[in-house]
Image (cartoon, rainbow, N blue to C red):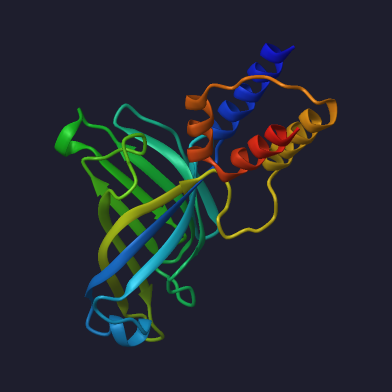
Amino acid sequence: MNKLVLAFFLAVVSLNLSATPLYYTFEGIISMHSTDGLVESGYSIGDKTNYTIMIDTDKKGELTHAGITTSYDDTSDYDYFYTDFISGDTILETTYYDIDESNLGYDRVLGGGIQDRLYIASDKRLYFWFDYETLTTLEINDYGIFENYWTNDSNELNHIRGNVFLKSISNTDPTNDVTSPSTMLLLFLGLMLLTIKIKFHIPTSLINSVKNTNYNYTIMYKIYKFA
């Protein structure tokens, strides 16, 4: 019985960590701008910006232009995926090149090394790219470039640009306080263990790994440890 419960717990952890979509939070520092970019954006050189982008590798990347949505299939050189702007310091009031919506990201894989590039176009005005990286190799604190484009009332193109680094990756939306289904399942398992008073040993290495991975698992551990 103990082995069965432990196996089920490990399965839930595994499913939760591998689930898509994932939420990527980036922090940028503005270093460049167009002539009127800073005036129109309200930012200054050296200002920090933050962005949260949803990435779903199980869905095709999409680009909507003039009301027509085009989906992108993987090729031998490009692996496409779906993106969505969740929150951040972007210019949202204006448009760029009549693109209605950009939910497109890709890994350019041309043999590895300096030819690789991770590109994320989230919303129609915000772009990230990381040279020598792919989505699978991108790690916390890796640096890339971000650009935010817009057109003003005179249809003039402006932008801000700077360095950006990956701050965090989460399987839940960090801007949403609503409890996710996976979290509810973990809490249910903890309460079940408390109710039926099951006692079993979990290796310290597993507990430390779980506690360092997700706060929700720490809560569940404390529940059944109390039982």
Q: Quadrant of residue 8?
A: top right
In the image: residue 223, left or right of residue 109:
right
Q: Is residue 60 visible?
A: no
Q: Is residue 95 visible?
A: yes
State the residue lying farthest toward the left. Answer: 114
Residue drawn at (31%, 88%), measured in percent from left and top?
Answer: 39
Residue drawn at (56%, 26%), measured in percent from left and top?
Answer: 14
The one of 189 and 139 positioned closer to us in this rendering: 189
The one of 173 and 5 positioned closer to us in this rendering: 5
Residue drawn at (29%, 72%), measured in percent from left and top?
Answer: 160
> Which quadrant, please, contains the N terminus?
top right
Q: Position of residue 58 (x, y in %)?
A: 53, 34
Q: Quadrant of residue 30?
A: bottom left
Q: Quadrant of residue 192?
A: top right
Q: Is 53 situated above or below 149?
A: above
* Total tally of numbered discs in the picture: 0
Q: Is 48 situated above or below 119?
A: below
Q: Position of residue 80 (x, y in %)?
A: 41, 38
The one of 153 and 38 positioned closer to us in this rendering: 38
> Which quadrant, please, contains the C terminus?
top right
Q: Position of residue 224 (x, y in %)?
A: 71, 32
Q: Position of residue 122 (x, y in %)?
A: 44, 56
Residue drawn at (45%, 40%), measured in percent from left and top?
Answer: 81
Q: Is 158 situated above or below 100?
A: below
The one of 121 and 185 positioned closer to us in this rendering: 185
State the residue lying farthest toward the right. Answer: 195
In the image: residue 90, left or right of residue 197:
left
In the image: residue 27, left or right of residue 69:
left
